[in-house]
């Protein structure tokens, strides 16, 4: 058994090496690669993906998993070895259903589409993307069809990102949430809007970077095992548990852009940096779902980074770095500015309260596209219609409409968005549990100390990596299933105070 | 035949993708990787190397090469297809002689040795390296022994880098060259030394970088298909013909360090950027030998970049960028400073004239070690003795003695050094041929124009990639074999003028 487990680990390490090599290529593609490198890079990444897929779906792995079943069953469910075998088997059964050639072709298509999108978006040219997006939809449906027996065609795609969730589950939770959010948004937006002009001054990039890095270092992001670079679209990527990087962008005319994206990505990164090092180079060395991952980024970006306590400590430091811009701006004005709620066009710039409405629009549209009740041709119109009905805003063009998010232009259609709102809900759930264990956390945050919160998250979430599913993790941490109440209470309390509701 | 050639190309592209992915990982390792990434990165690179070797030595490639022989023989020798088959076969026959396990073990040993050397050199601790270096020598001999029938045990190792050259050939050329160099060095060093204090002022890094990039852009280095980053040791690396990068380092107290390393690496890079794009992802898309590669870097670094004509154009610009440092330094003083000849200890800092003596010491020592006429135990003494007899200088320790070059500590012993001096010789030979075709090149250089020289090199050297061997290329360009006269004439003319010999 010992030998078979070791052979499995060796094979998984090889797959892991190919996957993480590919992550380095992707990171370079978006940070430093000169334009001339694009064509070959797409091919190189397709080759590595294909080889990783071939190696992972090798029948020898299937035989090892079968041989190891008695050993797995002799162990406690939550032991490392049993979990490794269980999680590997789940992924193996998923990946062996999809032919390697399909994966290669899809990745190649995604690379070309992404490249085209980087030009089509600034040019407001949806027409150029239409045929590619039709192919993407076709690929997405074909991918789902490798998993017959689903209730909804989106289910397999949702399952990739948020294992165990189905379209119907997500719809149910989203419906509950929408019922709470719509009146909250209405109440807030019936008040005079917050003045966020203090954020829209000139903030030199280098100083923004300095402040952001000070904050995430204080949070507990380890720069010996990571770094921050600049990209068009911020992201977190991992090359090993010892090398978890983030990227950000800076807008010299809007302090919030770079700062909150840095805090956001640091949350993703601290999750990965906190995984048990014994899991290195196995499928356990990964966040367990898109939703849980997002819960960690939103915890640090919003629950901590947009809290009044956090800024009681950090605002004087920010004023010191930007004296001309902030000397005469009181803390309360700044706090209201970074928590301004407004019905707007751009998801990534949206506030905590309306953000989820942006996500629900995309989630619903994905389902319609996959069902075939909406065509790519009609997509821009459908997008505009939903923004008008749900958010009461009208995009002047497709650049800030259907072209705004990278997701559909760099992967598949389906499964990409629900995790954002599931993450918000979970961030409220987990933070509530942390407060129950350590009621002193808010007081510590107001002193610029994050050790208790970071320690609780490491202990309860980070270290487990992919050992437990999202549902299992929620059950272990809260003693029950996913529920929206703590998140809604958090929003209502915070924004009730802010807007005197 | 068409189908078999295409299958060969597909397989070669896969090998190429793995190799270039590995190059991205190596580049990142030396530019941006945080310390925590080191352990996993070594494993990832070993995996990619192993897979590339497995894929390239797959017997299916051997069968394709056999099947394609009649097709190859039906084509002109210099046709692209015949050349692809011929060069691939040569590399296939070489690589299939060495077992994959041996390559893996050697690479692992090299990685550990390199890591130890990075600590042993600053600590001046050769004793620590001795057992590892003995293993390296053992590996080097075993590697050579996979190629029985050699005249000298170094021949197979020299062949890896400079295909077609044997130890005896190199010795003959080096002996001829030494007979010319020794009296030249004696004549120069009997004169008062040049004053290079103007280079040893404070030169801010950002401005050094700006000037260096202006120069190489003027040379013809294409920043749309490349970029420059900072590393401890400068190098050129290629991820595809559209992405050929260089690295440099800056010493704020020595202008020459960063500038000439930038010019040097740009020469390597322009060679790769100039290869026929039709060769992408095949063994033809590569420089043809270490010597030819070095000839291109030395052409731009020395023949162009240390010429008086070049500085007639660029010195006023340099003075404009560094007015405080250079306002009162005449062109002639600067020109003499960048061409200062002195007997010194460090190869990479050596001037054009003495540089080759450093190389010959290492070449001779490599042969002795491989023959067994010198032991690793006696190596430091032998090194010091040769520096005293050949260069008249004594290193105070091993740090600036036998520990100074990375080569033996990051690979094998043998074949690593001869290319540097072969390259210098070829740079003289090729430049002489370019001048015969275009006598106006020096006048253009003095106007800051490099198009004719760059065009001639692209036409005669770059575009061919690895299609022709070094000897074939020299024969095509000069109508004869490798000879030292043009290089010697270049040195004697330039340094005769400089030192009034």
Image (spheres, coloured by chain):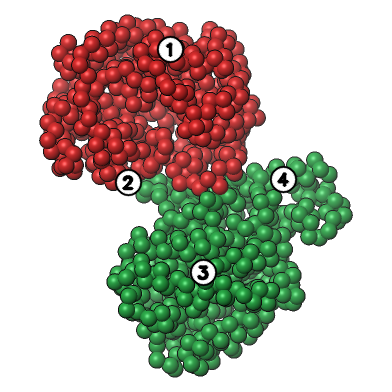
Chain colours: A red, B green
The disc, 1 or 2, on the residue closer to the chain's N-terminal end is 2
| Numbered tag placed on residue B448 in the rendering | 3
Element on which disc 2 rests: helix
Left or right position of B351 against A443: right
Residue at coordinates 45% horizontally, 15% vertically from top-left? A384
- The total of numbered circles placed on residues is 4
Residue B308 or residue B8, whichever sits in front: B308
Give how far apart the Cα atoms at labels 4 and 3 are.
41 Å
Element on which disc 3 rests: loop
Give how far apart the Cα atoms at labels 4 and 2 are.
42 Å
Tell me the mark number nearer the camera, choosing from 4 and 2.
Answer: 4
- Using the rendered view, name the quadrant where residue A101 is placed: top right
Same chain? Circles 4 and 2: no
Same chain? Circles 3 and 2: no
Chain at tag 2: A
Residue at coordinates 62% horizontally, 75% vertically from top-left? B440
Quadrant containing the N terminus of chain B in the rendered view: top right
- Using the rendered view, name the quadrant where residue B356 is placed: bottom right
Tell me the mark number nearer the camera, choosing from 3 and 2.
Answer: 3
């Amino acid at each position: 058994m010992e030998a078979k487990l070791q052979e499995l680990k060796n094979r998984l390490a090889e797959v892991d090496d190919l996957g993480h090599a590919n992550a380095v290529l992707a990171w370079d593609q978006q940070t430093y690669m000169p334009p001339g490198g694009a064509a070959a890079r797409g091919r190189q990444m397709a080759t590595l993906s294909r080889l990783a897929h071939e190696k992972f779906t090798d029948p020898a792995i299937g035989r090892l998993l079968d041989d190891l079943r008695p050993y797995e069953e002799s162990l406690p469910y939550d032991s490392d070895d049993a979990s490794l075998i269980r999680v590997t088997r789940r992924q193996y059964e998923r990946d062996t259903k999809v032919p390697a050639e399909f994966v290669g072709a899809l990745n190649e298509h995604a690379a070309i589409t992404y490249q085209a999108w980087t030009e089509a978006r600034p040019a407001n040219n949806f027409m150029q993307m239409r045929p590619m997006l039709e192919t993407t939809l076709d690929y997405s449906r074909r991918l789902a069809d490798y998993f017959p027996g689903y209730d909804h065609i989106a289910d397999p795609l949702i399952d990739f990102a948020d294992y165990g969730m189905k379209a119907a589950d997500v719809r149910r939770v989203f419906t509950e949430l929408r019922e709470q959010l719509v009146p909250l948004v209405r109440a807030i937006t019936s008040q005079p809007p917050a003045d966020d002009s203090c954020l829209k001054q000139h903030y030199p990039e280098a100083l923004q970077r300095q402040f952001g890095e000070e904050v995430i270092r204080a949070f507990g992001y380890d720069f010996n095992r990571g770094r921050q670079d600049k990209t068009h679209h911020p992201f977190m990527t991992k090359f090993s548990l010892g090398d978890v990087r983030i990227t950000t962008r800076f807008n010299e005319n809007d302090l919030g852009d770079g700062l909150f994206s840095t805090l956001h990505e640091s949350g993703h990164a601290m999750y990965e940096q906190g995984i048990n090092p014994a899991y290195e180079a196995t499928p356990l060395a990964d966040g367990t779902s898109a939703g849980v991952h997002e819960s960690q980024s939103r915890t640090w970006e919003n629950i901590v980074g947009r809290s009044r306590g956090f800024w009681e400590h950090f605002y004087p430091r920010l004023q010191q770095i930007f004296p001309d811009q902030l000397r005469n701006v009181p803390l309360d004005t700044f706090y209201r500015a970074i928590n301004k709620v407004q019905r707007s066009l751009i998801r990534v710039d949206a506030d905590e309260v309306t953000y989820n409405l942006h996500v629900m629009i995309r989630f619903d549209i994905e389902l319609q596209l996959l069902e075939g009740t909406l065509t790519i041709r009609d997509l821009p119109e459908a997008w505009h219609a939903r923004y008008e009905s749900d958010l009461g805003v009208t995009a002047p063009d497709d650049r800030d409409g259907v072209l705004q998010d990278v997701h559909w232009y760099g992967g598949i259609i389906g499964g990409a968005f629900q995790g954002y709102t599931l993450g918000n809900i979970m961030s409220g759930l987990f933070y509530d549990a942390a407060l129950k264990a350590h009621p002193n956390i808010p007081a510590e945050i107001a002193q610029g100390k994050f050790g208790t919160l970071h320690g609780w998250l490491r202990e309860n979430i980070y270290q487990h990596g992919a050992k437990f599913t999202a549902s299992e993790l929620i059950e272990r941490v809260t003693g029950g299933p996913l529920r929206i109440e703590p998140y809604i209470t958090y929003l209502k309390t915070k924004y009730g105070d802010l807007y005197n509701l």
